Image (cartoon, helix red, strand yellow):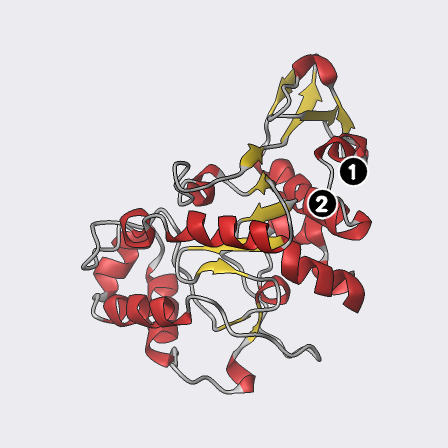
Amino acid sequence: MLTVISPAKSLDMSPVDHSGTEPEFSADAIRLVKTARNLTLGSLKSLMSISDDLARLNRDRFRAFSAEPDGSTVKPAVLAFDGDTYQGLEARTLDDDALRWAQDHLRILSGLYGVLRPMDNIQAYRLEMGSRLKTRRGKSLYEYWGDTVAKSLTAQAATVGASVLVNCASQEYFGAADRKALKLRVITPKFLEVKNGKAAIVSFFAKRARGAMARYIIEHRLTDPADLLAFRAGGYAYDPDQSTPDAPVFMRDYPTS
């Protein structure tokens, strides 16, 4: 199986001992950065729906982005992203063997880099996949990436002998994987919280659970979709009554603390 997750807006670029690899689409990242550099602060603020301070931060990031970065300005993606999904994944506590396995079986979808392996080096950036950044390829990043993301995922799945993709990414990011070009069965786990007898998706918890599911797959080196159903991290349990083969549902009581 191949698993995909979303990136995070929050970053931790502090140094680590791990060396990284070169992203497959680093040339595309450079092209997109050059486009973003031409935007005014107001345009960046509007594009990303962010504050003045964040617009200035990301303008400075685009200006500092280098085609040939040195080791002090890059970090492996899975160790640099620091949002809710990555709190569930806890990649910093995975051993070297697990990280090596993840390098072949986990992919991070990115508005700037397209598709990242866990240990691919990234520079500090923020560019959501849903951004309507105009390029020569179209009016959005979805149009820019076209079928590139899907073809990359399909090719990597073939490399590891996988026919199934476990989608632990958000709708925004998985929307970049053209389904006609994606020659894989897609399984999308759903994580629900039960409160006062009612079940609902709570974004904060669902993001963490998707990261925890990715970790579960990595730790146990899962290759059979049936093994996903044994996932129990964080108190979740598989609910067969609410599930379909391609959308397994995991439920738990709403946390009180």
Q: Where is residue 22 in the image (x, y as percent from the top left)?
A: 52, 74
Question: Which numbered tag is attached to residue 2?
Answer: none
Indicate whether 5 appears above or below 241.
Answer: below
Indicate whether 186 appears above or below 13.
Answer: above
Q: Disc 2 residue type?
A: Ala
Question: In percent of the image, x 63 and y 32: which residue is there?
Answer: 189
Image marks 1 and 2: residues in contact by CB distance under 8 Å: yes
How many numbered badges does the structure rendering display? 2
Q: Which of 224 and 199 is in front in this view?
A: 224
Q: Which of 125 and 176 is in front in this view?
A: 176
Dividing the picture into quarters, in which one does residue 103 lie?
Answer: bottom right
Dot 1: what SS?
helix
Q: Nearer the viewer, residue 85 or 186?
A: 186
Question: In percent of the image, x 60 and y 26: which residue is there?
Answer: 246
Dividing the picture into quarters, in which one does residue 216 lie?
Answer: top right
Q: Disc 1 residue type?
A: Gly
Report crowding for label 1: few under 14, some 14 to 19, many 20 or more residues within 10 A (C-alpha).
few
Quadrant of the image containing the N terminus: top right
The residue wearing badge 2 is: 212
Question: In percent of the image, x 33 and y 63: which residue is there?
Answer: 55
Q: Position of residue 180 (x, y in %)?
A: 39, 36
Question: Which numbered tag is attached to residue 234?
Answer: 1
Question: In percent of the image, x 62 and y 48: which residue is there?
Answer: 85
Dot 2: what SS?
helix
Q: Position of residue 241 (x, y in %)?
A: 70, 12
